[in-house]
Amino acid sequence: MRSFSDQSNQHSLCPGRTARKFPHFAYPSVHPINWTNHMDITNNTLTTFELINPKETYFICDELELHIYARNGRNESKQYGGDLFRAKIFTTNSTYSASSSTDGEIVDNGNGTYNAYFTLKWTGVISISVSLIYSSEATYVLDRIRTENQPRIVYFGAFESENKTQKEGFCNIQLRRPMKENEFCDFTDETTGSPWFCEKPVGFGCSDWKKHRIDGNKCEKQAIQVTNATEREAFKVSKTQLTGPVKTLTVIQGNATQALVSTDDLPVCTLGYNSKRPEIAGYYDQGNWFSPTCRVHRFRDVAQIKKCFSNRQLFFLGDSSIRQLHEYYLKTLKLSMSFLGEKGTGYTGPVSGKDLKNNITTLFAFHKYPIGKTTWTCDRDLEYIATRIGKIASSGSPVVVVSVWAHFESTPPLFYEKRVRGIVAAMGRLLDRNKRAVVLFKSGNTRQHTTFGQHACCSDWYARGNEERMRKIIFQDSRIGFIDAWDMTHAQLQADNAHPTGSHIVNMNDKLLTLLGCS
């Protein structure tokens, strides 16, 4: 059984308890598995969970432990690990709502059994939900096709001649076949070293390359071509709930030694409080997100936000999940919006917002390739994040918030790591030349998947792996702030969405402004 030891450090929310040490992002490696039909695959209706040492009544700060038993379609116990589960506890009624994910990750014991732990943080009737995100067979398929099938996404570049004739050529971070030098264009960025290649249509030059898009239909077909029917069967149970004998439990207030620490008594969240993932899960209470280690201020008044952003230039750089936050500010603060660039769009930007009275300027700009957008994007409107950060002036009080995850799940892990390292290095140089600058990373979040192609190209299993890689890199510099959207969306009551709904964005705003030192 994969073990973990108790830490001597005190539980941040429950002083009478010791915080456990959990193996975050430490599932056993995926080993080759041979299965002959769908009956060998982890079955969501036969896989069960149960409470360990159940009680009639629980107290605040009690630890809740679940044991999960993975079983296949023949109702046989699985003998190996690799399943990806997600669990949460929640309360919802006409007057109250609260929810929390597990403390740490669910522990994979490597033998078909799993353990999940929760800290009970509120009173009332609490429900338990456990979902099979990916079976061990599905994670094996995901690992295999990422290793064997590169490039896995089909992008196209549009080449346009002087007489406006247009043809398309395949593009990616690597060529799909050996080609002569005059048959392709090497658009590797000189500053960041990020590779990008396009097959050159006959009769066109590399300077004729103008636009970029993804072909989602071909991505689906390609994923089907590199898998067999049995392998694809493993994804039919993805993101499905398990059954268990206990659905609810009752939690009451205990004695003083079991009292939950008021989050008002925790230290205020600062940039230095982001050196690791907390061992205790945060939680939602009436739509407000509470960090388990530090206090987050609430900024729901427009005047508060404007005061915090006054005389600042804010850069929201990355994917559409950070664009979502920028759009919140455009709408909430009623900023004057401008589309920048030759063919700037709301999706990729650049998009600027301004409040002249309070001297607030915002900018959203998408990261450069890869970009999984089916409509055309003009190349000249795009810039690598590290390059854009390098152009930020040494004066003023700039704020840079970066999110890069959703469009990198199909790329080799080393490619993603290199991109993050380049951005972190650029952040470090900005901080060195401007002591008033603030830089933050927003993590990835859970997302919805409706087709096999989406699972194969951008699964939460890939996102989870990249989350581990990203955290290891950014936490090496304590000057970089961190917004943990990963934990927030694991605990949310709303369905998974690449652009989370509910109170997600206002809680992101709360964390950002708290890290800026506003109150």
Image (cartoon, rainbow, N blue to C red):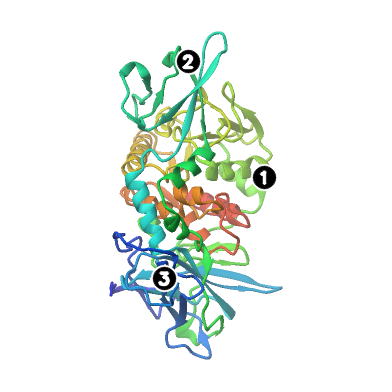
Instruction: Tell which circle, 1 or 3, labels the residue nearer the N-terminal end.
Output: 3
- Tell me the tag on residue 208: 2
Between 180 and 103, which is closer to the camera in this rendering? 180
Q: Residue at x 33, y 24 (%)?
A: 190
Residue lying at 59% horizontally and 52% vertically, measured from the top left = 505
Residue at left 54%, top 51%?
Answer: 451
Number of numbered callouts drawn: 3
Residue farthest toward the right in the current orientation of the protein = 94
Q: Residue at x 41, y 52 (%)?
A: 462
Question: Closer to the camera: disc 2 or disc 1?
Answer: 2
Q: Are marks 1 and 3 in contact (CB under 8 Å)?
A: no
Q: Quadrant of residue 36?
A: bottom left
Q: Which secondary structure lies at badge 3?
A: loop
Q: Are marks 2 and 3 in contact (CB under 8 Å)?
A: no
Q: Specify the amino acid type for callout 3.
A: Ser
Packing grade of label 2 (10 A; few <14, some 14-19, many >=20) is: some
Left or right? Give the position of 506 relative to 265: right
Q: CA distance from mark 2 to mark 3?
A: 58 Å
Q: Are marks 2 and 1 in contact (CB under 8 Å)?
A: no
316 above or below 477? Answer: above
User: Where residue 354 sits: x, y (%)?
Assistant: 62, 33
Q: Which residue is mark 3?
A: 12
Mark 1 residue type:
Thr
Picture coordinates of residue 485 (x, y %)? Answer: 49, 54
- In the rendered image, which residue does mark 1 sit on? 332
Q: Amino acid at mark 2?
A: Asp
Mark-to-mark CA distance, 1 and 3: 34 Å
Decide: is 43 above or below 65.
above
Q: Quadrant of residue 7?
A: bottom left
Q: Which element type, helix, strand or loop, lies under badge 2?
A: helix
